[in-house]
Image (cartoon, grey):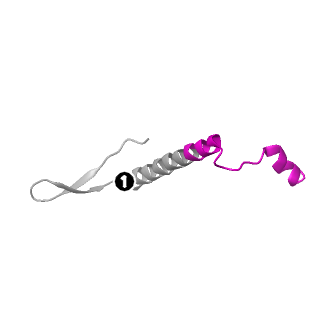
Amino acid sequence: MTELHPHFVTDEQGKRLSVLLPIAEYEAMLELLDDVQDRDDARRILARINRGDEDVVPWADVKAAHGL
């Protein structure tokens, strides 16, 4: 991931209230979060398949059904 360069908005006592990031860093964080969520979804679905909780269709059957 990209190195972050945050700028903090603080109150009078120095307590951090908000953070500002360059847009490229923000977008990189969103992309990473999306990738992590996709990975977790794939792992969850694979576990359901392995337990027999999901119906699956062999790839050869899909190709045959579509004339491929």
Instruction: Name the residue: 60% across, 45% down.
Output: 48
Q: Picture coordinates of residue 28 (x, y %)?
A: 45, 49
Q: Is residue 3 above or below residue 65?
A: above
User: Up-down: is 40 above or below 66?
Assistant: above
Provide residue 20's location: percent of width, then percent of height.
Answer: 30, 56
Mark 1 element type: loop
- Tell me if residue 4 is in the magenta stretch: no
Q: In this view, does 66 lie to the left or right of 43?
A: right
Label 1 sits on what residue type?
Pro
* Residue 58 lies within the magenta run: yes
Q: What stretch is highlighted in magenta?
A: 43-68
**Position of residue 35 measured from the top left corner of the image (x, y, whole percent):** 52, 47
Answer left or right for 18 relative to 59.
left
Which residue is tagged 1? 22
Question: Residue at horizontal 35%, vertical 45%?
Answer: 4
Decide: is 20 above or below 59. Answer: below
Residue 57 in picture, x, y percent from top left: 76, 48
> What residue appears at the point 26 percent right and 52 percent down from the top-left corner?
7
